[in-house]
Amino acid sequence: MKTFDHMTTIEQMESDTAKLKEIACKVCAETWEDRNKSQTPHCKFGEDGICCKNCSMGPCRITAKAPRGICGADAHAIAGRNYLRTIAAGTASHSDHAREILHVLHSTSPDGSYKVRDEQKLLNLAKEWGVPTEGKDIYAVAHAVAEAGLEEFGKPFGFQRFIKRAPAERQKVWKEHDIEPRAIDREIATSLHMTHMGNTADAEVLVRQGLRTGLSNGWGGSMIGTEITDILFGTPTVRSTEGNLGVLEKDMVNIVVHGHDPAFSEMVVTAAEVKELVDYAKAKGSRGINIVGLCCTANEVAMRHGVRMAGNFLQQENAILTGAVEMMCVDVQCIFPALPALSDCFHTKFVTSSPIARIPGSIYVEFKTDTAFDQAKELIKMAIDNYQNRDASKLFIPESKNTAVVGYPCEQIIKHLDGVTNSHVDTLGSYRPAVDAIKAGVLRGAVGIVGCNNPRVRPDYSHFEIMKELLRNDILIVATGCAAQVATKAGLLNKDAKYLCGAGLRRVCELVDIPPILHMGACIDISRILLLVSGIAEDWGVATTQLPIIGCAPEWMSEKAVSIANYVVSSGIDVYLGIEPQVKGSSQMMELITEGTRKLTGAGYIINKEPHALVKSMIDGIEAKRAALGI
Ligand code: XCC
Ligand code: SF4
């Protein structure tokens, strides 16, 4: 049998990093590896979530000798409050990103920087939201939909509109337990209010508000963000691309786009195609302009343009260390404040673009919707002019790169399933072929692998080990965010990765013509996974809690990830974590997040730092769900 021979191993990735570290030493640059050393061991109180500085009588730290803060808050109250604040911050980040995107939609015009690309999706959404469309110009509809979306953030009454998309069973659970998400800003503000000095001290109540706040992200902010981004820039389709640092080109002007909000990166990508700029780059002695992505921005532009991906979160400094980056331009979230100083060791120009992420030492070009395209062209010109400043003695581009097939939003998954069953018209437009494959045991189940990488564990290793083991066990993977990037770097988004799979999954990959890991987008697109799982549950006629489908964040680090975990658990899907949430100092909180939420939503966290043990528990979890279904 054919084998899969072009996988990049973690060891190879680490050897690339080691070579780049040599360059860092040579130019006296500091990287996260150095800072991680000086930050460990971490503060135990912070790690366990039992340091409170929510008022100036404190900070108060809980020990055996001092079991309560000055106000009397105990470990459970303090860990619970800290946890809820984390969820609120994560929800705010995803949702504020969505709000920005709504403003971009509101700015669209036929001759402006931003246009409507997916008119059908816009019309569908207008219908869903009851926005009148008849006799209206598409841009008038866009502006009305944008306003309706913006209402979701602050409306005084009612719940998030998108919860109507969830299975009836879920909506009932949310209502019963009083966790239906209200206006997004309200859930965030309520969480901050509840955790202010002198308010909620009951961990159970804090956790419940965490679920509701998470829901306002998953079925609110994030889902709005995904939907509107598709309307503005097109719903992603399947395309081929490449990933890892080898996508940087020795003889081209390399521009890295990094962050999350595609309003910015889309302009840069489009501007880089302008002929005068390409000619200008050639006139300056290069072979052209090479745009590559990092972190979630990479996923966004890869799915819509096939732009190649330079890597994930902990690789952001490596990109600059190659000495081949003329410009890195960033928007919001997951951007190391270390990047300007690092760029200064090279010729790299480091550009920030959002008032949300101002970083000292950067070149700040505030992006405005009405001038966005011209600003993007200016930036590209600046990068081209910088090409001649490259220092050959500091240049090292690792060769590692892999081909990847990306761009599987729900629409594309259904389209592929339709392709398999075109003779059975009754299953068209549904997930029933996938359901049948799971029922038959050809597929044992599915896992959504999401999230960051994190120096607390060997970076990327947990992802990699877990992914390989799941594939071997006929478990299909959908991936987003930096997890999807690990798969890209490793080569697991290649259709040939089917040779790493068990016989059942391999057959499915061949039949449906997909790689065994489906790239569904950026972290905000985990909202797509919610719809996928809900659709499968409905086509199957069972509850989401019964499905052999689970979520996993092996190396998460951000507050957004905690918010995500909460909406996934609220949606009835177990979440397997490879990094412990910072609540260990409270036995009650540990019980609540692993078991307590099960009584409310039917799902909870399973936590294990050791990836092989974690993946074993995942497979056991999937098999237990199968057994309970009698399949
Ligand atoms: Fe950030 Fe989204 Fe995490 Fe990657 S996966 S490190 S949050 S870029 Ni979302
Ligand atoms: Fe200490 Fe209570 Fe103030 Fe927190 S709120 S810092 S526990 S006194």
Image (spheres, rainbow, N blue to C red):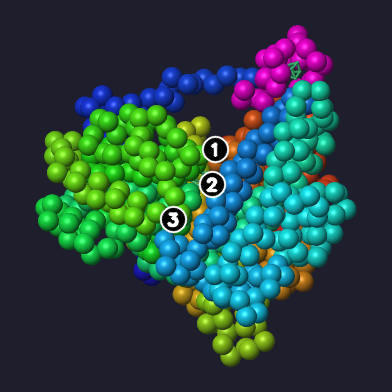
Element assignment for label 1: loop
Q: Identify the image quadrant of the N terminus.
A: bottom left
Q: Specify the amino acid type for callout 1.
A: Met
Q: Mark 3 points at which residue?
A: 370
From the viewer's side, name the closer residue of 198 and 17.
198
Reading the chain from its start, which is encountered first: label 3 or label 2?
3
Task: Identify the residue at horizontal 33%, vertical 48% (top origin).
Answer: 256
Element assignment for label 3: loop
Task: Say whether marks 3 and 1 touch (CB < 8 Å).
Answer: no
Task: Determine crowd level at label 1: few under 14, some 14-19, many 20+ residues with C-alpha closer than 10 A.
Answer: some
Residue 206 spot, x, y in % from top left: 78, 35
Residue 488 spot, x, y in % from top left: 41, 55
Residue 289 spot, x, y in % from top left: 24, 56
From the viewer's side, name the closer residue of 58 and 232.
232
Count of labels in the image: 3
Task: Determine crowd level at label 3: few under 14, some 14-19, many 20+ residues with C-alpha closer than 10 A.
Answer: some
Determine which of the numbered discs, if any, sits on residue 557 in the image: 1
